[in-house]
Amino acid sequence: MTIIAVVFAGLTWRLADLRAEALILERDQALEAAAVTQDALAWQKAQTEAISQALSRRDVRLEAIAQSMADKRQLLDTLERNDAETRDWADQPLPDGVTGWVRQLSDEADASAAAVHGAAAPGEAVAGSESEQQ
């Protein structure tokens, strides 16, 4: 019986050793997965911060543009109010084609801005980048 007890003890020890090795391997794999996940999260955080900063800069530029437009409109209103010749000119109907031309400029500006930012202008579908489309 002593031999059986020794063999049993040896097998039990080997089984425990194999379980420990499996647990160590599992722990190492989990640590590696956690490191990969942390790297991915750090990258995503950096991307989010970069996008946030870009949007903040964009908001500042848009606010400056809106303020400039408001100032110009106010200047135009003042000019129309105070200058009879300008008031008379502003009251005239637009010449033929001007309305269409202004709309065309606006549409081209929208399409250009969308192309710069990699998005389609309203009503447009983009199949790829400009180099892929040419």
Image (spheres, rainbow, N blue to C red):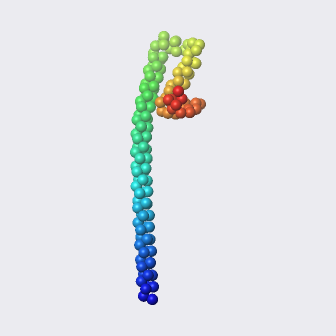
Question: Percent from the top left, x then y, of residue 66?
Answer: 45, 29
**Residue 69 is drawn in which quadrant?**
top left
Residue 100 in the image: x percent, y percent?
58, 18
Tell me residue 35's x, y (percent). 40, 55
- On the image, the x and y values in percent for residue 72 come to 44, 22
- Give me the residue at 59% from left, 31% from top: 123
Front residue of 104/83: it is 104
Q: In the rendered view, would you say 123 is above or below 23?
A: above
Would you identify the image quadrant in which residue 59 lies? top left
Q: Is residue 25 above or below residue 36?
A: below
Image-based side of 30 in relation to 120, left or right: left
Judge whether residue 74 can be spotted in this image.
no
Picture residue at 41% right of the left edge, 47% below the top: 43
Residue 38 seen in the figure: yes
- Residue toward you, 121 or 20: 20
Between 106 and 90, the one nearer to me in the picture:
106
> Quadrant of the image for the N terminus?
bottom left
Residue 35 versus residue 83 in the image, above or below: below
